[in-house]
Amino acid sequence: MRRELVVDLALILITMVVFWPLGRCQFINYDDPVYVTKNLPVQQGLTPAGVLWAFRTIVSGNWHPVTCLSHMLDCQLFGVHAGAHHVINLVFHMANTLLLFHVLRRMTGELWASAVVAALFAWHPLHVESVAWVSERKDVLSTFFGLLAIWAYWRYTRGEKHAVRSYLLAVVFLALGLMSKPMLVTWPFVFLLLDVWPLGRVPGFAFESPVVSGSGARRVTITHLLLEKLPFLVLALVFCVITFLTQRGASTMITEGSFTVPERLFNVLVSYVRYLGKTAWPVHLAVFYPYPNYPNPKWPAWQMLGSAALLASITMAVLWRARHRPFLAVGWFWFLGTLVPVIGLVQVGDQSLADRYSYIPLIGLFIMIVWGGKCLAGRRRHAQVVLAVAVTVALFACLVGTSLQLRYWRNSEVLWRHALEVTGSNVPACSGLGYTLLDEGRTDEGVTELNKLFQIQPNFAEGHYRIAVALYQRGRIRESMDQYRAALRCNPNSPVFLNNLAWALATAEDPSLRNGEEAVRLAERACALTDYRNPSYADTLAAAYAEAGRYEDAVRMAEKARALALALGKTDLAERTRRLLELYRADRPYHEVSRTN
């Protein structure tokens, strides 16, 4: 126990020191606004209404109420303070590190091998993204519950007095993990792997005692092994369906028409090998990795064939040694299997791979490497010294790499400039940097960056819209109108684009920019698309009617806008609309310098 305590303290202290700069990091403009900084229900903290919202709402194409509740609790305790949110991510990462160490220690009986796997997990640069990105709370949180599920499952397999309670706890922890992030749908498969090694529950496998210490688990029949996985499998299938439906409904899923089946399969082969490469040599890491030659992705033939050959060779090798070196097969299939939900077979988003997706899968590779090295060294003193030196160098390199990688997560501008350096021009990186500059008031710099984006994807409506908003806020109304029109050419049915251009046409201070008839046409279209239920859009239509000289219509629509605003609790909008009503009743239009919705 004393040695375990020393390991615990070392893991905690070193992890805390290396990740301590997170406390000074800001939120970034990639998903953080959706999860925290612009999410009003989350910012209101834990309330009865907020809890109901968390279980009823799809956020960023996913149903993960436990993650939403976690962000709510952060806001309840710390407000929208970026450093505190980052520190909570770090706390979960340290908890995961300790859980992984103790789970492996109990199941295998190996102290130092378990400690090294936990240290690699804690300090590997590929895991920086999962810890340093507030939006990836779902990653560290789901892993926390996933490891607790493994702990409970191990206790169940020992057949002790409270085995049934442990089994039920495993089910509960898995459910909580799935409600944090659905990547744990592979956990029934992970339990089966653990049955093979280190639990030794599968008949027909003869393990060598120097490699696997007795875990206390009982051997059972294959039928029993499969039947006891049914509750876990049902949970996994339910969440597979939920995830598929929510992501398809939220339009985050890329259909076959965007990336064909062959393109996705080729990317799967290459991405598995790229993950291996980044594990061995974690440099040039970025928050986004585009497909090659996007939007018509094509990997070189030599990469596809070479990747297929390498994966097949490793698979055959670990299967050949499975009976006597089962940790190789278990670690390898852990890596392959837990990546399946995010490897791109069902494409979600435009990324070809992502560092955050490796948070759980790398555990399998670390098990292969550490137990494989231990097996190679055997009892030879010289080999053990070489192994110890190699482990020390690897862990030190991980600490240095993680420290360097953390620097890029200071703020959005640094993160996106680094991504562009690593991956070249691509839509997320160009737009991320451009939006950052616009939000900081560096309008011309932001427009320059977004113009690079339009060279890649000319019909990127969101880019034109964000430029239009920034220009309008700075009184550059004519340029803003041009950008709104460009956005509408890309997406002619966007109520927001229609509404904002209509408002500018109706209320611009410069008479040469106003056009009441066009404003009415655009505003009526925006209201029709939203069934006349949006008070802001109705307010814009009232202003357009007034500019066109249709004051009776303006009064009628302004009254409707005010009623809608009051019904929705938007008292500020209702009060402003009341003041505008006085103008319209006096047959006067409303003009202002700038406004956005």
Image: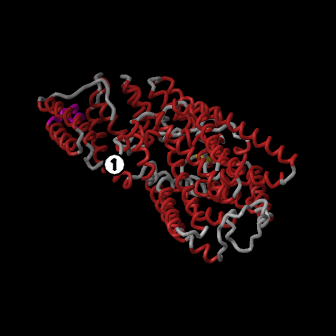
Color style of the picture: secondary structure
Q: Quadrant of the C terminus?
A: top left
The front one of 35 and 557 is 35
**Image: 55 above or below 77:** below
Residue 448 is a magenta residue = no
Left or right position of 198 against 591 = right
- Residue at horizontal 50%, vertical 64%? 171
Count of all numbered marks drawn on residues in the image: 1
Q: Position of residue 469 (x, y in %)?
A: 39, 31
**Residue 215, quarter of picture:** bottom right
**Image: 358 above or below 78:** below
**Residue 347, quarter of picture:** bottom right
Q: Position of residue 43 (x, y in %)?
A: 37, 40
**Which residue lies most toward the left here?**
586
**Image: 83 above or below 163:** above
Q: The disc labelled 1 sits on which kind of residue?
A: Gly
Judge the density around disc 1: few (<14), some (14-19), many (≥20) Cα neighbours within 10 Å. Answer: some
Q: Position of residue 207 (x, y in %)?
A: 76, 66
Q: Main secondary structure of the magenta part?
A: helix
**Which residue lies most toward the front here?**
2
Left or right position of 568 against 196 = left
Question: In this view of the protein, can residue 289 be seen by the observer?
Answer: no
- Residue at horizontal 69%, vertical 63%? 197
Q: Position of residue 548 (x, y in %)?
A: 22, 33
User: Which element type, helix, strand or loop, lies under badge 1?
Assistant: helix
The front one of 254 and 554 is 254
Magenta residues, start to end:
542-551
Q: Find disc 1 in the rendering and name its residue.
A: 50
Left or right position of 291 against 56 = right
Residue 545 is a magenta residue = yes
Question: In this view of the protein, can residue 577 be seen by the observer?
Answer: yes
